Structures are given as C-alpha cells and as structure tokens.
Amino acid sequence: MLEYSVNEHPDKTAVVLDETRLTFGQINAVANQVANGLIKAGIQKGDKVALSCPNLPYFPMIYYGILKTGAVVVPLNVLLKGREIAYHLNDSDAKAYFCFQGTQGLPIAEEGWAGFNQADRCELFYLMTADPKAESPIQGTQTLTQFLSGQPQTFESAATQFDDTAVILYTSGTTGFPKGAELSHGSMTMNAKIVGDMLALQHDDIHALVLPLFHSLGQTAHMNAGFSMGNTLVLIPRFTPEAVLAAMQKEKVTFFAGVPTMYWALLNYEDKEGRFDIDAIVNKLRIGVSGASSLTEEIIKGIEKKYKIPIMEGYGLSETCPVVTFNHLHKERKPGSVGTPIWGIEVMTVDQNGQPVPNGEVGEVVVRGHNVMKGYYNKPENTADAFKGTSWFHTGDLGRLDEDNYLFIVDRAKDMIIRGGFNVYPREIEEVLMTHPAVSLASVIGVADDQYGEEIKAFIVLKQGANITETELIQWTKDNMAPYKYPRMIEIRDSFPMTATGKILKKELKEENR
C-alpha cells in the first residue's frame, strides 16, 4: 500500500502532525531504513516485532518497515502498564520492541522498559524519543535515530502470501487475558480496500486521524485505506474537540472516523471563544464513520444537524480486521442497524446449537469470509472455541437480521465492557483487585454512562478485619492498571448474590445498578 503510493506520487503529503509534513517518499525512506536495521539485527520473516506508539509519524514508518521484512507487527495499547506489556511481549513471542518515549503524564517508555525487562524472550528494545536528536532518557537503551544511523533508504520487500500473518492484534474478548488475533496480509489488505471503496475515498481526501493506530479501525479505515488511496493523514495524538476541529479547519479535512464518545463530545462542544468557522469545516467535511459501540439516534441526529455530514455506522471486531457490516452510502440507512455485510462476507445468526435462526429472531452473530482471523496466536483451545468446528467465527454478540439482511446488534458479548471505545474485560480487573491484601472477593460490571457509554464499577468484599476506603482502593487500581481499565466506582459490600454453586450473579448486580 505504501510502496504503491510512493510509485504513484512520491512527493505528495502523506502525514501531517502540527507543523510537520512528510511525503510518501519520506515515510517510505525511513520504513526502508527500519527494515534494513531489523534485518541487520537478525529479525527474519515471521518474527514478531512489538510497537507502542501513539498517533505520530513514527507509527507508519515502523509499521510498514516491519512488514517489509516479512516480520509480524504486534501493536500495543500505549496505556498499558509494565506488567501488561510484559504479558503481551511474552504471549506474542516478540523478539524486538519499538517504544515511544511518551510524556510526563504518560510515560510510555518507562512502562515499556519495565515490561521489556520482564519479558525473557524479547531481545531488542528501541526507544523513539520525542526529539529525534535527543539521547535516550533510559540508560542502556538505543534510540531509533541511533538504530537507523547508516541504514540504506532502499529495501527490497520480502515476498509474502495472502495467508501469511501480517499483524497480531490483541483483543480483550470476554473472558481471561488478552488474546492475539492473527490477521493475514490478505485479510488486512482486502478489508482496507473494501472500506476505501465503501467510503468512496478519492485521491484528494484528507483524514482527521484521532482513532488510535494500535487499534484495528484506525489501522484499516485510516492508515491502510488512506495510504492505498494516496490520501493525507492528519495525525491527532490525543482526542479533544478543540484538537479535532482545529485540524479540520486548518487542513480542510474531508473524512473523520471516531467512537461514540468522540461524537458526543463534538456535539456538546461550545466554541465560546469563536475559534472555529463551522461553516467552513462543514463545507469540506464529506463523511463521518462511527464504530466500537452503537450511537444513539439523538447523537446521530445532533451531529448531522450541526456538522451536515452523514454518520455511517458499522460493526466489526479485532478478529475481523475489523469491518463485518456497514451502512453503505448507496443504500437505505435503517435506524439502529449497523448495516449489511461488506463484499465477500457472510453473516448469520444462530441458536445455541449453531443452527440458523429465522430473520427477525435474536441469535449469536457468526461471520465467515476473507476478513476472519487465522486464529488466536498460540491458543488452539480458544481458537477452536471461536469456530466450534465450523468455518464460521462465533462473535459472542447477539443480534438479529431483518428481511433485507440488515444487522441489528441486540447485546454485546457476555460481561464485556466497552468504555469510550476500549474493550475492557472484568475478569482481568477482578484478578488484579484480588491481589490487594485487603480484598477477599471482587466482581466487576459495566454501568451505563452518558459520556463513555459504559463506566467500570467494582464490588468488593473485604477480608475480615481489613480497613480500607473505597477511595483508597480506586487510587490503588489507578496505580496498577491502564487508565481505561481501572474502576472509577467501587462499592464495598458484605456479600454478593450467588447461585447455589457459589457463582456470583452479575445479572443481579447489573439490575441493581440500572
């Protein structure tokens, strides 16, 4: 995708970050240096290379550089703590790890270095400094600039096949620790090209890219689709309504994709200082896409009235690269629906025995086609459970298909929480809480929240004689979990509702907190 655009228009602007503007040729030259450096360091085709980086030019440079060698990219959430990073590095068998320095408020490299030192099989650590000319703030580590020094700016990319793994993308799922979905070159390419077609992307489109590039939607709908079309990506490392509107106004953005909380913030933002010419922004803005969780009809109507663009929703998962269904521009949009299957993809709803249910009835959503993952890396049991002996990937989500094959998601996978577009699974939080010396039992649920869609709430039973406040426990979880994971609400109780076999009845906890 990158090399095609380099051949077609090497001098066109590919990436914008504040005042920095880089062409496709410049991005490709650094990606080639990355590839040469990795080969020199002993990285071979099929090896895993991890990447922790926010929306900065470093991301596509390193991402495509890794792929050029035939190695596999393992993008990591930049909010992860050291313990969590170590798990991902070990689980993916990563041999090398590129990590951005971060900021005082988000010290990515400190956590990354701590995680690297707990990952026995990861051999190489490279630090991307905020200032490319700066020395490494962590003694004994090599900076990206040092790594690239003297490396040629040309490279013959390794030959890869449709089914070769390109990316291992970690997904929270609904139970247990994160699982790495193996996504192939063919699957990723097809999904990006189809998304580009569905959005009718043109050569002169300009993206406001605030969705994290370490997530599937940012990689597919923005970076890969955009690079394949020769589009310009305006990078926004951290979402605020001001940052998005400023980028739209300055760069004449035509395409924006976000999660519901971003649209909620944009709808409710008041430009009290008169900084933005909304009419000028609207005049250029062509389309908006929303993913991760459902938008309410009120937000859709409000956004379309304020910003004069159609908001198109879709449905997907990390395991499906991600797009499964979409509200196509040329078709009727049905309120509450996430659209119809994209080209080459089949969607069905089934009962507990895997048998199709009639249109209009609720069943588990299952998917098959070119977008489906190869499996969960090194987790054959989880992979077998996801496919259940068939060619269909079982999403765990409940939905119904109408007579026109429009999909309506009725409920999410059991117990999973989606907070501000991030998947959060209760079991991991519960296991961390249980390591606190005062905690005897923990149960975590999601509760409705106007801003984030869902907020995380933990119920705690203390050990006999323990003395700790809910506020102190919240602070402890904040210190031990990624910012999007820790519970903002904790309720200390004497007991939980349970079944006769001792299973906590989360359904009753949820009912109490509606």
Image (cartoon, rainbow, N blue to C red):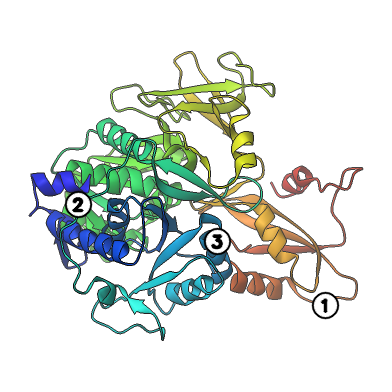
- Kindly identify the residue that appears in the image at 88 percent across and 43 percent down: 499
Q: Quadrant of residue 154?
A: bottom left
Residue type at mark 3: give it.
Asn
Residue that badge 3 annotates: 90
Indicate which disc, 3 or 2, sits on the residue closer to the N terminus. 3
Sort mark 3 into few (<14), some (14-19) or many (20+) by Cα contacts within 10 Å: some
Instruction: Describe the element under mark 2 as helix, strand or loop.
Output: loop
Residue that badge 1 annotates: 467
* In this view, 474 is above or below 31: below
Instruction: Describe the element under mark 3 as helix, strand or loop.
Output: helix
Residue type at mark 1: give it.
Asn
Q: Which percent across, then down, holds residue 475?
A: 64, 74
Q: Is residue 272 visible?
A: no
Indicate which disc, 3 or 1, sits on the residue closer to the N terminus. 3
Q: CA distance from mark 3 to mark 2?
A: 30 Å
Looking at the image, is mark 3 or mark 2 nearer the viewer?
A: 2
Q: Which percent across, then down, holds residue 12?
A: 10, 52
Q: Quadrant of residue 495?
A: bottom right
Residue type at mark 2: give it.
Glu
Quarter of the N terminus within the rendering: top left
